[in-house]
Structure formats: C-alpha cells, structure tokens
Image (cartoon, grey):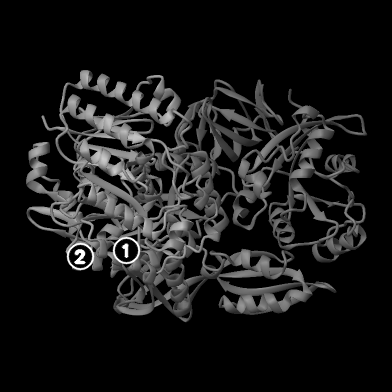
Amino acid sequence: MAAKKENIRNFSIIAHIDHGKSTLADRLLEKTQSVAVRDMTDQLLDDMDLERERGITIKAHAVKLNYKAQDGEEYELNLIDTPGHVDFNYEVSRSLAACEGAVLIVDASQGIEAQTLANTYLALDHDLEIVPVINKIDLPAADPDRVAAEVEDVIGLECMSAPRVSAKTGENIEQVLEKIVSDIPAPIDSDDSKPLRALVFDSVYDNYKGVIVYVRVVDGKIKAGDTMRMMATGAEFTVVDVGYMRATSMESAKELTSGEVGYITASIKTVGDARVGDTVTTAEYPATEPLPGYRKVNPMVFCGVYPADGADYENLREALEKLQLNDAALSYEPETSGALGFGFRCGFLGLLHLEIIQERLEREYDLDLVTTIPSVVYKIHLTDGTVLEIDNPTNYPDPAYIDFSEEPITNANIYAPNEYVGAIMDLCQERRGVFKNMTYVTPDRVDIAYELPLNEIIYDFFDVLKSRTKGYASFDYEIKGYERSNLVKLDVLLNGDGVDALSFIIHSDKAYGRARKIAEKLKEHIPRQMFEIPVQIAIGGKVIARETIKAMRKDVLAKCYGGDITRKKKLLEKQKEGKKRMRHFGTVEVPQEAFMAVLKLDE
Amino acid sequence: MKNFGLYIHIPFCKSKCPYCDFYSMRAYEGQTDDYTACVLEYLEEWAQRLGRKADTLYFGGGTPSVLGGENIALITRRAKELFGVDGEITVECNPSAVDDDFFTTVARLGVNRISLGMQSAVDTERRKLGRQADRQRVEECIKSIRLSGIENISLDVMLGVPDQTKESLTETIDFCLKNDVPHISAYMLKLEEGTYYYNNADKLNLPDEDETVGMYTLLGDILESAGYRNYEISNFSKEGYEGKHNLKYWNCEEYLGIGPSAHSFIDGKRFYYPRDIDSFRLGCEVVPDGEGGDEEEYIMLRLRLADGIKFDAFRERFGKDFPQEIVTRAKPLKQHGLLTVTDSSLHLTRKGFLLSNTIISKLIYG
C-alpha cells in the first residue's frame, strides 16, 4: 500500500567503517517492527557471509519500514544501505542519488574519520539533507559533546541537537526515527503523471525470478504488465512484478509510484540488459531524457584471473557474468597467458574490491583461481607520438620505442591521532608520496594530505597503514590525474624461462628492492623440485636479483612389498591431485600460493 | 599361462617392533598350530578354485619363524603338492625368534632362501629398533642357515634409523660383506602413522633427510663396488640372486596372498584378505581392490627396477608402443641424471630412485 508522498522518506546511512552503520540499521528494523525478534540475526542487511565476516557492507541493500511518528502520522521510511569502504564510493553514490537525506553516524569515541568526511561530501554533492547521529554512547571512552563539537567545526553541521544513541543497546533509537521524519524532505517534487523515470541503484540476480532490479521511482509509475525499457541499452521487458523490499521478504504491490523505492522483476536473464546505473522507463509512455547523476566508473586496478583447472574456464565466465550483474564496477575480458592458459583480465575499483570478487568466486561459485599481480593503467607515450594505455605488463612495449611514461597519482588523506604522524610520513615517503599539507582537525588529530602514486597503494597500503598506527589511522583517496614517471617492467624467470603472469611494471627506484623480495618469496613458496631451479628477476635482459631453489632430495616409497601396491597407487593419486593446483612453467611447477605470496609482498 | 607366486602371511611376532605397522600379534598357546591348519585349508580351496601352478613361495610376516619349523615344513610340502612349487622358497626370519634346528627342518622340505631381519649390525641401533638378538647371534644364524644347506641368504638393513651415522652404517655394510651374503634389502625408515616411532619422532635422534640420502648413496656405492647390483630401489644382489618372488610384484605379474592383510593379483583383479585374524580363521571372503595390471601400474612398478621398462616387452604386453608423451617428458630429466632413456628402454638412475615418486608421477601425469 502506497503512502502519501508527504509521508515518504528516502534515506541512506553513511558512516566510517565500524562506526555502527549495520547495527543501527538493525535497530531501526527492530524499532519499526519490520522484523520479528526471532528472525533477528546480527546485521541483518549484510546478507553475504563475507560482509558479516569482514564487518563491512559490500553491496547496497534497501528496505521499507513503516513508522508511526509522534505526530500520529504513518510514515514510509525507505532505508537504502550503502557500502562503507573507499573502494566502493561509486556504489555509495548510486545509493545516495536515490535518496533525499542521509543519516550520518559518528562514533562517540573516535569522532570524525576519513570516510566520515568522504561520505559526507558525497552526500552533499547529491544535495542530501544530513542528519548527524552520535553512536556508541555506551562506550566508556564515549565523549559525545567533544564529537558533536568536532562535527560542527569540521563539517559545519548543526550537531548539538543530534540524537545520541547506542545502536548496540537500543538507547534513543526513537530519536533517530523522529529526526528522519522531521528533517529529511519528502519526495514531493515527484510527479506520477510524467513518463516513468526510475533510477536503478542496485540489482540482485535471483535464480527463480531473474534479475531483481532495485529502483527509486523519480517520475511516473510502473506496474506489472507494463513494458519496461532500459534507457541506456534500449532493451525491453514485460514487467512481471513490482513491490517493496521488506526486511526478510519481498512484498508485491499493485504499482510503484513516483517518490517510492521498490523492486521490479521482468524475467531479465542477461547481464548486459540490466545494467546497474541505468534509468528505467516504459515503452508505452517513454521519457526522453535519462536521469542524471550516474557516471560510468572506471576500474582502477587490473589483474588476470585464471581458473586453476582449465576445465573451469566456462564456469568462471558465467560466475563473472553473474557477479557483474550486481556489480557495475567489475569489468572483465578474455585474455590468454602463456603460463596460465585461458582466463580473464578483470578490472576492479581497488584491492579490497579485487579480494572480495576473488573470494566470492571461490566461495559462491566453488572455483579455484590463480590471480596475477595487480596493475594500474599506465600511459606509455611512444617516440612516434602514439599513447598506449597499458594495464597488463604483457603488453608493455619495447623500451627502445618509449618516449616517456605516465602513471596515475592520487590525492590521499590520512586521518590519525597526532602521535602517528611520524610513522605515517615514513610510510608515505617509502611509497613515493609527495607531502602536501597537514592540518589539525582537533588538538590531537591530524589530517595529512599526500600525493601518492596509485600503484603504491593498491597492493597493501591500507593494511600496512593500519598495522603501523595500531588501527587508528583512516585513509581515503581520489584520483588526481596522470604524471610523468620513470617506469620499468620486471620479468620473472624460472629455470631460465620467462613467466608472463608474474611480470609487472614498477617505478625504477623500487625495482631492485622489489625484485629481491619477489625472488625470496618465490624461493620460499615454490617447493623443491627434481633439480635445482634458478629464480631470476630481470629488467630487459639484465638480471637484477637471483635466488636458487635447491633440488628435492628424497621422495621414495622404500618398501613396496608384500604385493600391497594400493598405498603406492594412492600416493600417485595424491600427487596427481596436487598437480591440479600447480602451474607448469617449462619444467617448473609453481603452486598458486606462490602467486599470492608475490602479490602480498609486505606481509 | 605364466605361473604365479604364492605368498603366505604369518601374522605373529614375539614382540612388536616400535616402527612396524605390518599386521602381526603375539600368538597365544596353540594358535600357531591352529593357524597352520587354517592356512592349509585355504590352500586346498584356492588350488581347486584356480587349478594353476605356482613357481615361488614366500613366507612373510610378522615373523614366520615364530610358526616353528614343523609348521613351515607342513605348509611348504602341501603347497608343493597342490601348486607344484618348484622354484624359490623364502622364509623371513628374526634372529632372535628362531630355533637352531629350524633351518634344517625347513631346508629338508625345500626352503631354499632365508631373509634375515637383521636391520643393523650395530647392537645399540638394533636394540633401539626393538630387536633383541645381538650381532653374535646374527652371525650364528647365518652359520646355521649355511649348515642346513641354504646358501641364498638375504639380510635386511635399515637406513635412517635412530643414532645412525655414515660411520655406523659402514660397520653394518662391512658385516654384510664379511659374511658374503648374496642379497641385501636396504630400506629407508618410514614413520608409519600409529607406530611408536611416528608418535615420538622428535625424541628419537633420527638422521635428517640429507643424512639419510647420504647413507643410501654410500650404501649403493660400496655394494656396487663389491659386485652387488642395485636391481630394485631397495634391493641389492649378486648376479642370479635377485628375489624371484618379489620380482613378480615389480614385474606386475600374478601372485596369490594367503593370510590376514595379504594382497593378491590374479586374473587381472587385485584383492586382499582383511587385517583380521579371527575373520580369516572363520573363512572370510577376499576384499576386491579393483582391476590391476594396466599400463599405469606397469610403468609405476617397473620403474622401481634398474632394468626399468623395455619398450619391446611393453609392446608385447599391451599390444602398442610405449607412450611417446612419456618419452618426451622423460627427456628433460635425463640431463639432470635422474633417468636414462634410449630408443629401446627407460629406466631410473640411483639418483632417480631417490625421487621415484615425483618422477613417476611426472612421467605419467605430466
């Protein structure tokens, strides 16, 4: 049942990671009795295992809540959850575009962190009304007054009347609901009589229903039987069902009207036809202009993804297809590696995004994967004036034809207690950072601005930063642009044969150190083989690092006796199984772990 | 049809050695006679079922000598009658579990080969292996065997046992050479799950892998220069003294095993008796263990032999050429001295023997 437009509130919750976004969402569901207490599991909206384990929201989700406010009116609150990591700014922006307001959660002890600011600015970009909420007041270290002042100082939001809550204990949650009703505008500009324009802010593939498209209806209305048209692709489908997302189920509705948030199903089966980010209209009464606000995100980090067992190639393709359906930021195209066979060159928003996709492929699709070293996109200017965009070291041109190279540079901000300034600056220096600015956000917290090359932060920067600051630093970045850089390509040779999948592009100042580490890691992770194997790292023809994997000494079943050859056979079977996890490079067998180890050099 | 080999498992020992996981137990009063009667019944049954001849007979264990000379003689005589055994007849013996007249008794009925579980000629090492007899007792045994008329003697030697060094191994090898036995089996100790050794490995002062490899190499070098041939990974012999029965296993030929835990390969089928003496006594059926004798098995087993695979024999047996892809895989290993491959044969070197599992799986699976 549709509410009056004046009584609809569409909002997101934004926060720095771990400031309690999912817990607050759970509490709102509980308070509005959207979920029976028996169905309540922690962090209900994070329904992927991965999300619960990592404590971050990867995918946006939406849910409709009914709330009877103190003014006696029934309100329809549409909560659109947003991802909480720097890699997923685009997904955050899609969700924010579907809202009129955002609840900003700030931790009462930690105060403002990097993503608090980044997400707030993103919300302000979308003209959202921001409702600050101070959370975790139950913690002993909570200092809501100080944090409220910080929010006023740094962000310029009125915060003295902000609800001070504990999502954990449920204290003052009612105040948040009242604030949403009173401060966030209703979608009153919406017009049911106009042609349909609905913003796709998320979509989920369902085995039975096909693609479930999550939309915010901006203008017009849509109902079952209509012919929906995707404005970017022109694809058309007959709508099977429309309705609202409830916390634990989907609720069919007669129609979705402007201002509302809901779902559409239309037996959409192929990925390309249901691009997330598109505008839905109808064939019967089409809109002329798609909705603004969506930009195509460009993957920043690329790597090769290969099935460990070549027979899984088609399964990998299907899995990527399905993941892309829910993840507009993932790109892939087929590639072939001499070493790894057939696979895909995949583009990701960042390393976390890469890891998540990889884990989902392995867990949800039961695939064993080998991934190559991630790369950013370099611009290589050749002497004849052409410019190559290289995201794969395999395509790196002969240095003789290179005039100069450029690499992507980020503007990075790191927020931390001031006692870690030294550690942070050391790290940024190691990563070829250029210091820009340092400001005191509060007397004991600093905001340090650096220009950092993207390829220095995609591997492990955030992990190292966290470990060097005992987890207190937070980090955010955006792409600044391309700058000239002195790049070289490192090749890895095993027993004299080049391993294309291990090549990568690096700044020349870093080449020697990195080469040495890679050689060590490979030595450590490649098991002894039947003969000695030299590991060499080279630039062009010049070897700059070398290690030797010693030959295996003994692998023999001494006693094959009494006619019991079962054991011997089993051993052989086991070795056969083991071979599946191995990659062959000439005469050398390399386990997948070796690839992963090279990827995570600094652990 | 070729004759098969007959194996009798004697699952009794005076005491259990701390590294051993073969199926054996201490026999109670009268059990050895019962067991002998039981084996005789099985022999009758199999003779009827197969109607074929065997040419080798092998008593393994356990410690077959625990059964007593009379019982071994009974079984030997019946096996000869039923299967026409006319070749090598071997009994495994433990020097500390054999009577003086044992050898005379069994030799009279046709036993012509004794495999003696010496393991080490160094008494301290032997004691740690759970072996009671001292070096002198082993020497006396060898004398008794020879006095009984049996000259085909094999000594077991273990490599990589607690406290062992190259020096102490040299002592053991010298002992073998001094006694001039025609056959030596030299096994590298393997820690078998469930054994005392397995559970206490860290307290045992075991030589490390490199040292064990060094011992194997040293042993091979000394024995070869003394006229022995390393004809199988763990076996050395003077010419003509190769273990004929054991060769059947490595040649992928047929054998029938009687006794709990004994394995058989007959008419293309592998099967075995369960590791349970009670069900064996009650006349249990064999447990099928799949088809045997395919190319993969043949290659895996033959490559344990110094002769390796002769392509002619392969063609004769399987009616096709030896797989070219295996030859292709073998070639790069040649330069590392792991094997020899020619137009007519493929075999591992001694260096290759040490890596035989890896090499065989590489050759077969790529």
Which one is nearer the viewer's eye here, A263 or A366?
A: A366
Locate the C terminus of chain A by quadrant. Answer: bottom right
List the residue tagged with mark 2. Answer: B224
Q: How many marks?
A: 2
List the residue tagged with mark 1. Answer: B216
The residue under the point 22% across, 30% down is B77
The answer to whether residue A329 is seen in the rendering is no
Q: Are marks 2 and 1 in contact (CB under 8 Å)?
A: no
Q: Position of residue A329 (x, y in %)?
A: 52, 50
User: Which residue type does callout 1 highlight?
Assistant: Tyr
| Residue A554 - label | none
Q: Mark 1: give few (<14), some (14-19) or many (20+) Cα within 10 Å.
A: many
Q: Position of residue A364 (x, y in %)?
A: 52, 39
Q: Is residue A455 above or below residue A158?
A: below
For residue A244, side relative to residue B119 (left or right) = right
Q: Position of residue B165 (x, y in %)?
A: 41, 69
User: Which residue type does callout 2 highlight?
Assistant: Glu
Q: Mark 2 against mark 1, which lies toward the viewer?
A: 2
Q: Mark 2: give few (<14), some (14-19) or many (20+) Cα within 10 Å.
A: some
For residue B266, side relative to residue B205 (left or right) = left
Q: In whole angstroms, how far apart are the C-alphas of marks 2 and 1?
A: 12 Å
Helix, strand or loop at label 1? It is helix
